[in-house]
Amino acid sequence: MKGIMKLFIKLLLPIVLTNLAIISSAQLKYDVWFTNNSLRIDYYHSGTDKTESIMLKEIRKEEFWGGTKTKLIDPFNYGSYRVNVYDSVSNTLIFTYGFCSLFEEWQFTDEAKILQKGFPESLIIPYPKKNIKIELMSRQFEDNKFKKIFELYINPFDVNIKNEKTVSAEVKKIQYSNTSDKALDLVFIAEGYTLNEKQSFYDDVTKISNYLLNLAPFNKLKNKINIWAVAAISAESGTDKPHKGIWKSTALNSNFNTFGSERYLTSSDYHTIRNYAALAPCDQVCILVNTETYGGGGIYNFWNISSAKNDYINEVFSHELGHSLGALGDEYYTDEVATEDIYNKNTEPYQQNLTTLVNFDSKWKNMLGNDTPIPTPVSDENIGKIGVYEGGGYQAKGIYRPYMNCKMKSLGYDFCPVCQKTLENVIYYYSE
């Protein structure tokens, strides 16, 4: 009888825990599970074009949690990676978010076909009050489903969790609207600015902020946005230009010529970037590079980087923010970085401004006029109309965009209504 009872309990327990997780996820209260600090897990993401693995570096406690305290379960399902945080005793899902990474982009390069390489990354979550389990999930190209690639149990009272600042820098508030849990916190970090150029950095942040806060949809939501400037000091001005043999000693180790594209400006030194970002409450990392050379880059919930002294800085920065904040996809399809295999045309991309029509109901279909043809012809009569225009995501055929011209396609245009709606939803997520 005891054996039967033990078997019954063993069979029943997973069902009970699953139900508890479902119930608790709908009634999560931040203060029950988390403190006002952040937990950061630094690791290396390595592999080839077909493989990936995770190697833990260290775990850190940081001063600020800048994110939402009400929407603990991410409603968007954007990004190529997903972080699930569970209470390790009850198996309650208590926090989730999605992101992309530089490693993922590298996997589509020719180098990844012949070489194994690693990139630093970090997971950032609110600091837990109880033991937790963290899962890192990777979206699979073949079917868009997530596969677990890493699991880690953490005791928040572990004495080996590091709790010291590794960098220092002056931090200024450029715009302050509300407490960080009720606002989107944009943290600008200086790159390639020397001590004598610190004021120039603050001027650049102010200039870009003024542009952004007058751009739809940010102009009507400026009371939900905080802007911080972190004046990381570099030994030398500028940034690396490997294709020209120029190398500079800078705070964040940025460089042009990423993956062979001269204008692709990035930094793979992600742990250093997060060290500076931790000096302020942070939802989005925005890096300004002290160079006149045109370029930039943006990766969802990772960072965006722009050339601060280029004439097109406002346009480039806002385009890259579309990537890093809203997970918006590039809508152009004739470019030096074009590739034919970054999207699987048999699945629906998570980017809200792109569709393969596999599941168009999940995109902007409800924003179309009743008589809008699918696909929609590119013609003068359709300028300014939401439609389904072929060409996007670096591919001329099989992927469609919602507007003939949008900031995610060409510089000099506003965000289209679909992109604006996506960005609005994300800003509300962080601020309400």
Image (tube, rainbow, N blue to C red):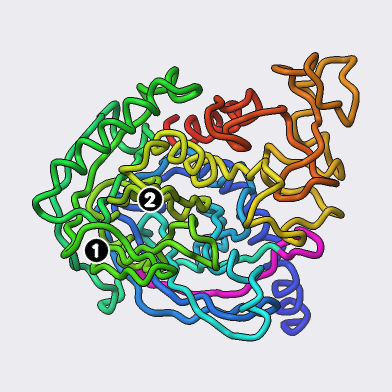
**Left or right: 362 with respect to 319?**
right
Q: Position of residue 351 (x, y in %)?
A: 67, 44
286 lies above or below 340: above
108 lies above or below 276: below
User: Going by the picture, which residue comes out furthest to the front?
Assistant: 244
Q: Residue at x 63, y 80 (%)?
A: 48
- Secondary element under disc 2, as helix, strand or loop, is loop
- Depth check: give the residue in front, 366 or 137: 366
Circle 2 residues within 10 Å: few <14, some 14–19, many ≥20: many
Amino acid, disc 2 = Thr
| Boundaries of the magenta span | 140-156
Q: Tell us which disc is closer to us: 1 or 2.
A: 2
318 lies above or below 131: above
Amino acid, disc 1 = Ala
Look at the image and say whether residue 185 sits in the magenta stretch: no
Mark linked to residue 270: none
Q: Which residue is mark 2?
A: 293
Q: Position of residue 56 (x, y in %)?
A: 44, 79
- Secondary element under disc 1, as helix, strand or loop, is loop
- Depth check: give the residue in front, 107 or 55: 107
Q: Which residue is mark 1?
A: 251
Image quarter in which the C terminus is found: top left
Q: Quadrant of residue 328?
A: top right
**Residue 261 appears in the figure:** yes
**Left or right: 170 with respect to 380?**
left
